[in-house]
Amino acid sequence: MIHHTWLNRPTMKKVKCVHTNAEKYVVNRVLTPGKTYDVKNETEEFYFIVDNTGKVGGFYKEYFEEV
């Protein structure tokens, strides 16, 4: 149950949001293009970041580029 401690974990790296043009999901409410976010965990397909709501959320890597 690692997801319970993600918010307090050290940041793995930082990523910058490059777009919020999602086909399926509404991400423009929690991501801002051009803003840098802290990555708390990562899988092959997703970054788990602290988004604009202050909570950890999982987003496709296609929305970001590494800083």
Image (cartoon, rainbow, N blue to C red):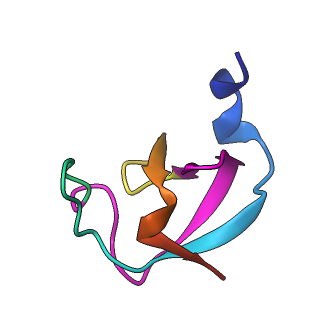
Q: Quadrant of the C terminus?
A: bottom right
Q: Residue at x 55, y 52 (%)?
A: 49
Instruction: Give how far across and how far down residue 62 sits, in percent.
Output: 45, 66
Compared with residue 62, is residue 48 higher up or lower down, i.e. above or below? above
Specify the quadrant of the image occupied by residue 38: bottom right
- How many marks the image carries: the answer is 0
Instruction: Give how far across and how far down residue 31 sits, in percent.
Output: 34, 63
Instruction: Give how far across and how far down residue 9 sits, in percent.
Output: 77, 42
Residue 30 lies left or right of residue 13; in this view the side is left
Instruction: Give how far across and how far down residue 52 sits, in percent.
Output: 38, 57
Compared with residue 21, is residue 41 higher up or lower down, i.e. above or below? above
Q: Residue at x 65, y 57 (%)?
A: 39
Give, as a single range, the part of the protein colored magenta: 28-49
Specify the quadrant of the image occupied by residue 20: bottom left
Q: Is 30 one of the magenta-colored residues?
A: yes
Q: Residue at x 73, y 24 (%)?
A: 2
Q: Quadrant of the N terminus?
A: top right
Q: Foreground residue, 23 or 26?
A: 23
Compared with residue 24, is residue 61 higher up or lower down, i.e. above or below? below
Q: Foreground residue, 51 or 45?
A: 45
Q: Is 59 one of the magenta-colored residues?
A: no
Residue 13 lies left or right of residue 38; in this view the side is right
Compared with residue 2, is residue 58 higher up or lower down, i.e. above or below? below
